[in-house]
Image: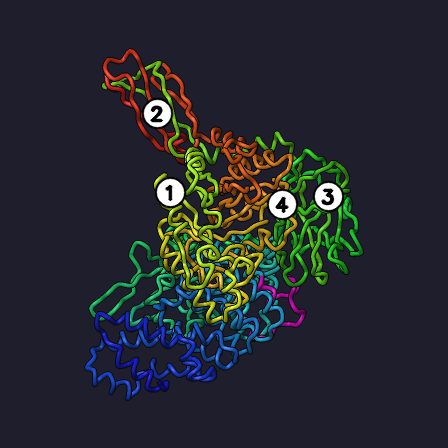
């Protein structure tokens, strides 16, 4: 079908009936199909051709007349046409190989986002739009960069404050800070960075980060990593405007005064520049005064400046300066005190509001009015609301919120105004902060300055480099030196590195029985680079941790180690990228004895896993019953602890009885895997997992779904390994649909793409975001179940950089960027040789920063004399970490043996590993405890979370002397402290 006829066919099928959206979905799917793109060719992308769909030309009006559509109907049709067009631009245009096609797609997106804020695609395809636009910013032409930055800013405006825009802010800041260091025409980039920061910054420190990046263009001498070339006048003006705009959005008194000293002097010197720069400098100075933060920017410079205007006054107070300076410049401040929007007047009561208005209007252009009327975020910024009226929407300012004061009057600092713009819980800033919870952030912080070393550095000598190079020596052939940042921070640098291990070093004596926690703040000089901390011992090399270090900010390497023999050791840092300098600061190595380590575990368990319970036995009249005997039994544990099973559970009653007596959680070792259910293409057999699920359901056992697909080619069905990409796509779709639809709601989680940090079979065929697409597909079928990554060596092998915690966090980012926004969990397999508990704890700490649920999904230990002892260490460490939500032991029994570790022999008698599991099950609350009530009828206990049954026995009570009651123990607020359960015993 030709393109023109196809579009006409779509128009004929568009109507305002109840089937609108079904028709639209079919149309969108047709337009988005690869076939339709091939029909018209990449150069004639639909994004450009769809202009006819978005216009109101005569032919369109004629067509509408033929169908007698109402005004409302035409509006619906236009919106739907726009939606189809945008989908094409996002799904195809942004991925086009030709620059012109991408520019056309971006142009259509910018037009659409400018005209209206009501675009569902902005939310549904947020990650795709962000990723592709940032790619255009990095690699595109000047025109493409301009359009892409505009699209990013508009995307932030449409989405409003939230996790998505915070992610957008972090990615944009990283990209733009590098771009601004060499891009000649940076006006659009600066404008976009300011907008994205306004919407996406988590707190004032984030805003200050952007202000620092912008300031590097205004005054390179006060910045770093910036070209020495002076900015052009337009760029300088744009930078000052963006900087002032961001200052209006925060409490200036929270700024880092050490960094900003000299800003006032610099603005005063720029007053002699061109007219545009002078005007913007005056605005900046006035905002500094209005915000009451002169002291952050050097009040002395302001006093000197004022003295030049008033020879009769040798000194001038800040209060006087606030009144006098504005009078000198008031005529030059060309700012509006009000504006009209849709016939409604909106007054500005502060300079900050007026600057925000001017900046926002400049950014939105023709779309300003539409955004002001539709965008709740903007309405919060300018403190007004929209209400329906007979003649259309109107804006208004609630009377109890309206504050009108003259520009620059000291009255602007009255408490009422201050509360309104800075502290009000209903303000834009407060609402944004509430929505951005740190616990949901995917990526660890990269800070402008490193934090203090943990434990004061522990046994590290000169951990903050405050004593020159004392204690530090060269490792390999690197050159090392101490440097000082502009903020006065000392750090050590290794440069002119020729080998990965060339760096700096410090000597230690490590003891066999100790647990060593290690941390350091690292930075590199150029592009991102992996850096490892390694200890060279007499017996080999022990990795203590990894970090993906970045230029321009400090990242924390958090790890640890144990050694198998006491002796000397050399700490050094390693990066395969020898072109980068390695910078380090706040280095810490802290030893703990086993007793201290276990004490911390127990403290964590007491806090995270247990709650105090007070049981009160009373008679029918409510009187306490002393000396009553209580027996408390846990009927269901609150912490999921289970074991894998094999299909042998279906045929062996001894296996069944043993398992049912111990576990309420399991995973099938192999029986759900693709190679097992479809060994021959088209011959799908779920009879075994069906039977296993019947067994678990009958016995109240919860099951983890393992696994939908495996990224290791070795575990892809042989017949599927060599299919064409098209045929493999069909096969994968069939696999996902058949498995997930069959067991949706019957499993508590899904391991979707197993081990996709180490392997990439599906990515090699379908592209980088194959995993994200597959997670989205599974979520579309079983939307209520959490989908997990599942990886080995992340907690068990510090030397495996492919699965380091930073790599794991990067994979989570990739899933989110690729479009998967559903529930996500972290699976850590835990196949140990020799456990490194400090590294294990540090890794879980870092992954816990995401706020995602963490399971130890396949725990076992290799055979050896210390297998049981090591297993106990690992299980205690996992149970003791508050972010771990469950543990599965990988010990599915088979007559010929287990994968690596069995808990019993073939007669289901415990092996030493089984004794460990039984001991921990008892310790973690399954077995009963009890006691006798005191004189007030009370009995107190501290119990693990779970379901309980208490039985009260008192022989002197008439009638029934035994009473039972069920209750639940879970986490409580600090204020509550304990759970109180009253057990009524009838007299």
Circle 3 SS class? loop
Q: Tell me the distance, in whole angstroms, between the alpha carbons under discs 2 and 1.
A: 29 Å
| Residue 234 falls within the magenta-colored stretch | yes
| Residue 33 falls within the magenta-colored stretch | no
| First along the sequence among labels 3 and 2 | 3
| First along the sequence among labels 4 and 1 | 4
Q: Is residue 573 above or below residue 626?
A: below
| First along the sequence among labels 4 and 3 | 3
Q: Who is closer to the viewer here, 369 or 796? A: 796
Where is residue 55, by image quadrant? bottom left
Residue 673 place in picture, x, y as percent: 47, 54
Residue 133 place in picture, x, y as percent: 49, 70
Where is residue 313, by image quadrant? bottom right
Q: Which residue is mark 3?
A: 462
Residues at badges 3 and 2 in contact (C-beta under 8 Å)? no
Instruction: Point out the frontmost of discs 1 and 3.
Output: 1
Q: Which residue is mark 2?
A: 950
Q: Is residue 523 above or below residue 79?
A: above
Other residues around mark 2 within 10 Å, as few (<14) / some (14–19) / many (≥20): many
Q: Tell me the distance, in whole angstroms, between the alpha carbons under discs 4 and 3.
A: 20 Å
Q: Which residue is mark 4?
A: 559
Residue at the (62%, 68%) spot, across then down: 181
Magenta segment boundaries in residue numbering = 213-238
Residues at badges 2 and 1 in contact (C-beta under 8 Å)? no
Residue at the (30%, 17%) spot, across then down: 624
Residue at the (66%, 69%) spot, across then down: 227
Mark linked to residue 695: 1
Q: Tell me the distance, in whole angstroms, between the alpha carbons under discs 3 and 2.
A: 57 Å
Q: Is residue 914 above or below residue 667?
A: above
């Amino acid at each position: 079908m030709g393109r023109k006829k196809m579009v006409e066919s779509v128009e004929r099928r568009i109507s305002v009936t109840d089937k609108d959206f079904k028709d639209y979905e079919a149309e969108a799917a047709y337009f988005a199909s690869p076939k339709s793109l091939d029909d018209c060719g990449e150069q004639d992308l639909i994004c450009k051709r769809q202009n006819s769909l978005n216009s109101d030309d005569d032919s369109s009006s004629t067509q509408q007349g033929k169908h007698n559509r109402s005004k409302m109907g035409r509006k619906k049709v236009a919106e739907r046409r726009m939606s189809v067009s945008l989908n094409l631009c996002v799904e195809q245009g942004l991925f086009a190989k030709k620059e012109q096609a991408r520019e056309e797609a971006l142009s259509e997106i910018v037009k659409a986002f400018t005209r209206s804020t009501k675009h569902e695609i902005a939310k549904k395809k947020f990650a795709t739009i962000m990723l592709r636009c940032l790619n255009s910013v990095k690699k595109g032409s000047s025109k493409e960069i301009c359009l892409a930055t505009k699209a990013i800013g508009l995307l932030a405006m449409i989405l409003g404050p939230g996790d998505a825009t915070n992610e957008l802010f972090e990615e944009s800041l990283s990209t733009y800070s590098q771009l601004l260091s060499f891009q000649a025409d940076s006006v659009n980039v600066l404008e976009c960075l300011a907008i994205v920061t306004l919407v996406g910054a988590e707190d004032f420190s984030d805003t200050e980060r952007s202000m620092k990046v912008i300031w590097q263009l205004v005054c390179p001498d006060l910045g770093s990593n910036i070209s020495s070339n002076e900015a052009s006048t337009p760029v300088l003006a744009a930078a000052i405007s963006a900087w002032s705009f961001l200052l209006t959005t925060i409490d200036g008194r929270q700024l880092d005064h050490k960094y900003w000293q000299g800003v006032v002097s610099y603005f005063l010197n720029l007053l002699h520049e061109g007219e545009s720069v002078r005007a913007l400098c005056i605005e900046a100075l006035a905002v500094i005064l209005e915000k009451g933060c002169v002291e952050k920017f050097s009040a002395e410079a302001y006093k000197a400046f004022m003295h030049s205007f008033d020879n009769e006054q040798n000194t001038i107070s800040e209060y006087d300066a606030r009144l006098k300076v504005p009078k000198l410049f008031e005529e030059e401040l060309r700012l509006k005190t009000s504006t009209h929007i849709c016939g409604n007047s909106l007054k500005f009561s502060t300079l900050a509001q007026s600057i925000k208005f001017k900046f926002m209007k400049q950014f939105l252009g023709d779309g300003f009015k539409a955004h002001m009327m539709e965008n709740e975020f903007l309405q919060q910024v300018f403190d007004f609301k929209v209400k329906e009226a007979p003649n259309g929407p109107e804006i208004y300012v609630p009377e109890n919120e309206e504050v009108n004061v003259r520009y620059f009057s000291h009255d602007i600092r009255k408490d009422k105004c201050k509360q309104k713009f800075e502290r009000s819980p209903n303000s834009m800033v407060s609402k944004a902060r509430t929505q951005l919870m740190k616990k949901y952030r995917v990526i660890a912080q990269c800070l402008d300055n490193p934090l203090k070393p943990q434990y004061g550095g522990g046994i590290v000598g000169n951990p903050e480099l405050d004593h020159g190079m004392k204690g530090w020596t060269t490792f390999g052939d690197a050159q090392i030196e101490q440097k000082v940042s502009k903020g006065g921070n000392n750090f050590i640098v290794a440069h002119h590195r020729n080998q990965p291990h060339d760096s700096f070093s410090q000597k230690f004596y490590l003891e066999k029985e100790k647990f060593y926690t290690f941390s350091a703040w690292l930075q590199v000089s150029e592009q991102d680079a992996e850096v490892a901390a390694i200890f060279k011992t007499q017996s080999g090399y022990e990795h203590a941790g990894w970090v993906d270090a970045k230029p321009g900010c400090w990242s924390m390497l958090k790890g640890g180690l144990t050694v198998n023999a006491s002796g000397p050791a050399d700490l050094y840092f390693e990066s395969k990228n020898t072109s980068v300098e390695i910078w380090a600061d706040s280095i810490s190595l802290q030893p703990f004895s086993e007793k201290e380590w276990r004490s911390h575990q127990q403290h964590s368990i007491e806090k995270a896993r247990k709650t105090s319970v007070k049981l009160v036995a009373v008679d029918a009249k409510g009187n306490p019953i002393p000396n009553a005997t209580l027996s408390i039994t846990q009927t269901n544990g609150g912490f999921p602890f289970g074991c894998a099973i094999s299909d042998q559970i279906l045929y062996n009653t001894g296996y069944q009885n043993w398992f049912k007596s111990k576990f309420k959680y399991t995973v099938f070792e192999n029986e759900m895997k693709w190679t097992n259910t479809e060994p021959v293409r088209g011959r799908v057999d779920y009879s075994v997992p069906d039977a296993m699920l019947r067994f678990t359901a009958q016995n109240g056992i919860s099951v983890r779904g393992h696994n939908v697909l495996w990224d290791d080619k070795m575990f892809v069905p042989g017949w599927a390994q060599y299919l064409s990409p098209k045929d493999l796509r069909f096969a994968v779709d069939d696999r996902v649909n058949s498995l997930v639809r069959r067991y949706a709601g019957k499993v508590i989680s899904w391991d979707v793409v197993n081990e996709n940090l180490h392997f990439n079979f599906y990515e090699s065929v379908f592209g980088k975001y194959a995993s994200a697409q597959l997670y989205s597909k599974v979520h579309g079928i079983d939307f209520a179940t959490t989908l997990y990554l599942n990886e080995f060596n992340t907690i068990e092998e510090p030397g495996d950089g492919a699965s380091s915690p930073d790599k794991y966090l990067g994979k989570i980012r990739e899933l989110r960027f690729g479009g998967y926004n559903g529930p996500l969990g972290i699976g850590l397999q835990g196949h140990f040789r020799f456990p490194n508990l400090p590294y294990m704890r540090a890794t879980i700490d870092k992954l816990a920063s995401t706020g995602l649920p963490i399971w130890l999904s396949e725990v076992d230990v290799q055979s050896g004399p210390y297998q049981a002892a090591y297993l106990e260490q690992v299980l205690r460490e996992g149970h003791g970490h508050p972010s771990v939500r469950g543990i599965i032991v990988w010990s599915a029994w088979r007559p010929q043996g287990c994968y690596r570790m069995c808990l019993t022999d073939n007669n289901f008698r415990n092996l030493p590993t089984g004794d460990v599991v039984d001991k921990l099950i008892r310790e973690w609350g399954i077995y009963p405890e009890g006691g006798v009530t005191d004189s007030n009828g009370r009995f107190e206990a501290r119990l693990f979370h779970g379901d309980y049954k208490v039985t009260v026995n008192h022989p002197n009570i008439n009638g029934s002397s035994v009473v039972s009651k069920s209750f639940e123990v879970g986490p409580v607020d600090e204020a509550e402290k304990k759970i109180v359960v009253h057990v009524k015993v009838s007299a």
